Image (cartoon, rainbow, N blue to C red):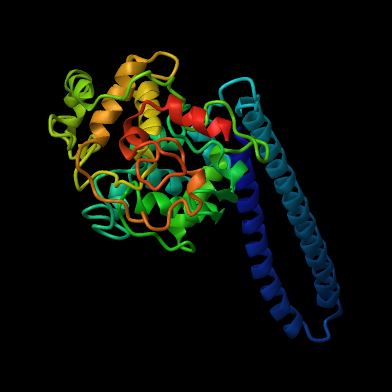
Amino acid sequence: MDSLYLYSVVWLTLAAVVAGLIVMSSNLDVFIAVSGSNESLKRQVSHLNWLRKILWFGILLLITISVVTAIRMLNERNRASEAIRAAVWPVYNPETVWKAPNVSLAETDDNAVLIAYGRDLIARTQDYFGTSGLVRPDAINGLNCQSCHLDAGSRPFGNNYFAVASTYPQLRPRSGSIETIPKRVNDCFQRSLNGQPIDSTSREMKAIIAYMRWLGTGVPKDAKPRGTGLPEVPFLDRPASPDLGREVYVSKCSSCHGADGQGLPMPPEGTRFYPPLWGERSYNQGAGLFRLSRLAGYVKANMPFGVTYDNPQLTNEEAWDVAAYINSQPRPGHPFLGTDWPDIAKKPYDHPFGPYRDSFPEVQHKYGPFKPIVAFYKKK
């Protein structure tokens, strides 16, 4: 018999006995009141009174035993759950690519509800902040967080969140300040989603942080597991070519993102869309993917849809060229152009906006070739 069923029967039986004893006690009290001076009745009442006390003691003893047993069963169940969880949880190894824990394991976490909400916010951001958003309608462009952070930020080399909990807060040269996780999340809302920041104390922010921390469970402090972020694509000896990239886009990208780059329904009759890659509903010029190296790494490891980092379809040349084509198309402007990179010497080699601490032109910082720029800063 199932232990939970048996335990329920025990508690129902105890409840019935207690109810019967209460009824008996009330009748006994009436009997005591009317017994008067009859010695025979008094002796019977005395015996019944002792019986009542013994029954109450027995019931209290049974309740105590039941509570102790329940606590022990709960502890055993928790220990068994933790053992199962530990057996299937990814083990950190700096030499191997970190795999995200199975999402079903989140159901065993103390913050399971918040983690599930955070994952849904990442995967279906449009449902909460899009055109008919449940939290704040018309607050973002046409992307979800997982448009840039694949599989809700859990895919190796898919711009994932593996190292968020282990590396934040951190000093980031782009802002020139110490950044927290809420600051980093709101950066994405304002740049990649081209919207407004969300309240850092809101349930939505707490849920997103809970999910990110859960994804990084087991990653040591300050560690960046293999597979974090995006891969680096080897440099070309020439500038990346938007013209060549257009040919790659037409043959390998337009079937999902459309000839106009605005995304197509998925499935064809569905209400959800593959993300727009340019235009007013795509990421703005302040987003990380507007840096060519970031977008080239993203498409090399993850596109066309369905490929993986260890089985890519695009060549290095195709990855650079299609990234150049996508980032040459119109999109919203840079919202923080006057405040980003306060120390211009720390700008990355492919930051496409001057001024710079070098003599290379802005177009070379955008499309390359990047080897001469990197070599220049290595000498300094």
Number of callouts: 0
Outermost residue toward the front?
A: 359
**Residue at image x 62%, y 32%?**
85
**Residue at image x 13%, y 29%?**
259
**Residue at image x 19%, y 35%?**
263
Quarter holding the C terminus is top right
Q: Can you say whether 327 is above or below 245 in the image?
A: below
Residue 109 or residue 65, whichever sits in front? 109
Q: Can you say whether 46 is above or below 322 in the image?
A: below
Residue 226: percent from left, percent from top: 57, 26
Residue 50 or residue 253, whichever sits in front? 253
**Residue at image x 51%, y 50%?**
209
| Residue 203 in the figure: left or right of residue 82 | left
Residue 151: percent from left, percent from top: 40, 33
Quarter holding the N terminus is top right
Could one spot residue 305 in this view of the protein? no
Residue 236 or residue 48, whichever sits in front? 236
Residue 321 or residue 47, whichever sits in front? 321
Q: Give residue 359's quadrant in the image.
A: top left
Could one spot residue 52 in this view of the protein? yes
| Residue 245 in the figure: left or right of residue 116 | left
Residue 245: percent from left, percent from top: 23, 23
Residue 294: percent from left, percent from top: 40, 33
| Residue 355 in the figure: left or right of residue 176 | left
